[in-house]
Amino acid sequence: MQRIAILGSTGSIGENTLKVAAQYPSRFKVVALTAYNNYKRLAQQVHQFKPKYVAVGEESLADFKRLGIKGIKVIPASHCSEIAAAADVDTVVLAMRGAGALMPFLAAVRHGKRVAPANKEALVIAGELIMKDAKKYKATIIPVDSEQSAIFQCIDQQQSPLVKVHLTASGGALRNVAASRFDRMTVRDILRHPRWKMGPKITVDSATLMNKGFEVIEALRLFNLTHDQVKVVVHPEAIIHSMVEFADGSLLAQLAVTDMRLPIQYALTYPHRLPSHVAPLDLIKLGQLTFHAPDTKKFPSLALAFEAARKGGTLPVVLNAANEEAVDAFLAGKLKFTGIFKVVEKITTRHKIVNSPSLNEILAVDTAARAAARAMIG
Ligand SMILES: NC(=O)c1ccc[n+]([C@@H]2O[C@H](COP(=O)([O-])OP(=O)(O)OC[C@H]3O[C@@H](n4cnc5c(N)ncnc54)[C@H](OP(=O)(O)O)[C@@H]3O)[C@@H](O)[C@H]2O)c1
């Protein structure tokens, strides 16, 4: 029996993780669930899965406690690290959004847990520290983000190192929209992703292609690569989730339908593969798979992320912090879609990079970049 903590259980990844756990009740015991504002959905999940620990965002904590659910320990969401470190938790699924996942991620690796990160922001801002500690404390990290899961699956059991990674990108909601129309894009337009059904923040990042840029940095950290080893290829069908190239020129790819239950289940059951509720691929019906180069002029956020990947240090911290603030402002109707790039570009251009930053330096740079972005937006 694997005891699982799902941090961010009310989101898109969290709900899919619960579907996987519910399919194998004799294998998985959900011992912790956390949410931020959606305490009502959290309460329903608590009734169904009967966890021991629950965390809720500070603003909804009193409302949740008022429901009077017995037999659970309720803590504020800012204390999620306690859950990640708890002795009766084997696996931590990081399904929460944003850089707030950093401290629970570090707590989980420092307690030698199996960690299944869907969250990418923590790896973008502090991937080097996380991977160093994972090695030191013998934690196992099995990525859930579908591209990183694909790479992990392609290199598993290989005796030779990879030469290159080809990260696939579906192209997001604006792939076929002229850049001249970007200024008029509404939140509704942007949240209509053609392939994946995800939370709002990552869906906006997919439209700007910042999400792909974050994945480039995530891959560098998870697989210890240099920036010139990661290529992005647009693949609108989103069937190949990424590819790995070896010294002989061979490419290995992982293909599956676009359903996050697959990488989640793989991360939970690795090194085994169990039957899933996901339909296998019908290649004949699919007919063809297409590929082309990303357009970094149309999607300058990707170019910005490539630069942050190349320069490293605290630049990815600033990139992420400014982006989180700008995306939140866009979703709240306070910033135009094209304003997201403008804010992130200005804040990152100004930044004086600190190389090999400590955790305290990362946290300080994150706070300062958020304040600067908020002031600029305001
Ligand atoms: N969705 C996907 O298919 C997908 C694929 C690959 C990677 N990812 C990554 O996985 C992460 C989650 O994505 P998602 O699409 O599932 O997001 P989502 O649907 O917005 O869900 C986010 C979850 O985190 C909680 N949360 C929000 N802000 C928080 C905070 N400040 N502190 C603690 N918890 C907080 C939310 O609680 P409330 O519901 O109460 O707000 C919710 O449970 C992101 O980092 C994303 O980049 C997602």
Image (cartoon, rainbow, N blue to C red):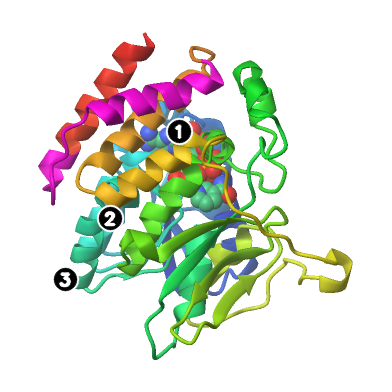
Do the numbered discs 1 and 3 sit on residues whose CB atoms are within 8 Å? no
Name the residue: 24% across, 69% down: 112
Q: Which mark is residue 136?
A: 3
Residue indicated by mark 1 = 68
Q: Disc 1 and disc 2: Cα gap in Å?
A: 39 Å
Q: Left or right: 239 with respect to 159?
A: right
Question: Farthest residue in the front direction?
Answer: 297
Left or right of 75? Residue 298 is right
The residue type indicated by label 1 comes to Gly
Which label's residue is closer to the chain start, 1 or 2? Answer: 1
Where is residue 283 drawn, in percent x and y? 81, 72
- Residue visible at 11% across and 48% down in the picture: 358
Residue 270 visible in image? no
Q: Secondary structure at mark 3?
A: helix
Residue 23, numbered label: none
In the image, the segment drawn in magenta is 336-362
Disc 2 residue: CB within 8 Å of ligand 1? no
Residue 256 location in percent, x, y? 68, 68
163 versus 127 height, above or below: below
First along the sequence among labels 3 and 2: 2
Q: Nearer the viewer, mark 1 or mark 3?
A: 3
Q: Is residue 358 rendered magenta in the image?
A: yes
- In the picture of the structure, the residue carrying the numbered disc 2 is 127
State the CA–CA distance, disc 3 to disc 2: 14 Å
List x then y, in percent, for residue 141: 36, 67
Discs 1/2, front: 2
Where disc 2 sits, the SS reads helix
Circle 1: element type: loop
Identify the amino acid type marked 2. Gly
